[in-house]
Amino acid sequence: MASLDFDVLIVGSGLAGLSAALHLAATHRVAVITKGRLNDGASQWAQGGIAAVLAEGDSFKAHVDDTLVAGAGLCDEEATRFVVERAPQSIAWLRALGVPFTEEDGALHLTREGGHSQRRIVHATDATGAAVQQSLIEAVRGTANITLFEGHMLVDLITGAKLGLATNDCLGLYALDNASGEVRTFRAPHTVLATGGAGKVYLYTTNPDSATGDGIAAAWRAGCRVSNMEFIQFHPTCLYHPYAKSFLISEAVRGEGGLLKLPPALGGTRFMPAHDERAELAPRDVVARAIDFEMKKHGLDCVHLDISHQSPEFLREHFPNILARCAQLGLDITREPIPVVPAAHYTCGGVLADLAGRTDLPGLYAIGETACSGLHGANRLASNSLLECMVFAQAAAGAIAAAPASPPPALPAWDHSRVSDADEAVVVSHNWDELRRFMWDYVGIVRTNKRLERAAHRIELLTREIAEFYGNFRISQDLLELRNLVQVAELIVRSAQLRHESRGLHFNRDYPSLAENAAPTVLAPVAP
């Protein structure tokens, strides 16, 4: 099959990918490649908002300072200023696209979130991501020069080194067409990875099923460095129910008096006061560690969050969505507590990228949660993630527009000679479950050297098994995602083993103190 030729390939259809496509479409032929539908990514799920200095009395310096504090000493100050200073124009661009942000008295309504010293969160009620994504999708579908390839899963990047060329540029990629089972060859002088994070490497996550670290793993295999992979942000309270997946129970429930308790079989006693004087109102990482401790101590699958002492009228007014979703699952939160677990929420590390999204591989860019831009450091400040997507989408588009581009050489078609195997689906499913369980148990909120060693050993065994399947059998989306998750898991574990301290989102009982002169963790692959 002949290659599909474009000026720019964008992998991923969240806020970062679609923004980049719109910025480039006036001058470039753009392909947007996404393994599901356009709105299947994490951007669609974002509830909070976008941080931007717009209020009187606020300042870029204050926003920068808040970000640096949250990042626990590992934010890149230049990158932080770069993002913060471009936030207002990013909001203006979204408003021009028609995003229906919440207004009050004719002006944008700004709310405040944890870690922010000022009101600076622009939002669309409590569903900002969905509102932004819908506007972007409508704009992309109506823009010439953008070709959409939904249902196409990234297999691997095509590089000069893999083809035996003198220069190791990114020349394109292979993508699996899930409908036909064919692997298609895409060719372009520029490729942008905007594939999101890797929350699905953990048993419990707030992320959608698409968050399997595809871009991070592919960039690593192509020879790019990654940074800060040990810093995974966990949300303390995700609904625990066999028929509920990735449903958050807002921090506001604790803010309005919700109490964390052990199950009735253990007395139903409240436990947060024993962990922190701020009890349920302690920061996210403190609450998440406390819940993790109690679950491991007692062998529990979850703990309980009890707000039933508030009146039904109060709950209907303040938490209508939570009340309704729990009711659908047979939980009456006006009478009984909510079963909750912490859940992986955001990948703070990723592919090392500069202020234009450029990676180590010429022609390859990484933006959004896929990248490590230096903005988040050891812990992401609330509502900086959507902002990062927009700023670096525009920056990468500018760099691509200014870069010389000659057509890549002819690329070889994918080898379709592999045969299928009847046992593959069963093995993939078993390995997926095993990986997510031991990553949760050994590389979760609280780590130890022994737990990390156990995880590394299991990852080594899984890696060999998956490599055999990948090398000998016909590929599938499930196999590709498992391959990527195991690679990302290895990077998380290796990064965690290198950090001999507890900082931000990384807590190791064997190294409970902060180290002096700490630096980002950077891993470099062996040259291909």
Image (spheres, grey):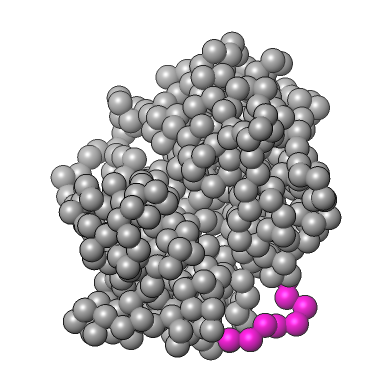
- Identify which residue is drawn at 55% across, 20% down: 140
Instruction: Relative to 186, say whether 165 is above or below.
Output: below
Front-most of residues 63 and 446: 63
- Magenta-drawn stretch, dominant element (helix, strand or loop): loop
Lateral position of residue 8 relative to residue 483, left or right: right
Instruction: State the count of labels.
Output: 0
Lateral position of residue 151 relative to residue 137, left or right: left
Magenta highlight on residue 238: no
- Quadrant where the N terminus is found in the figure: top left
Front-most of residues 93 and 123: 123
- Identify which residue is drawn at 26% across, 53% down: 326
Instruction: Relative to 380, say whether 13 is above or below.
Output: above
Which x, y percent locates residue 423?
17, 50
Which x, y percent locates residue 291?
40, 75
Which x, y percent locates residue 65?
78, 61
- Identify which residue is drawn at 38% across, 72% down: 259
Magenta highlight on residue 512: yes
Which x, y percent locates residue 403?
78, 29
Q: Is residue 21 visible?
A: yes
Lateral position of residue 248 relative to residue 351, left or right: left
- Identify which residue is drawn at 71% across, 16% down: 27
Q: Which residues are magenta?
A: 511-520
Instruction: Relative to 108, say whether 298 is above or below.
Output: below
Q: Is residue 174 visible?
A: no
Instruction: Relative to 378, say whether 508 is above or below.
Output: below
Front-most of residues 298 and 513: 298
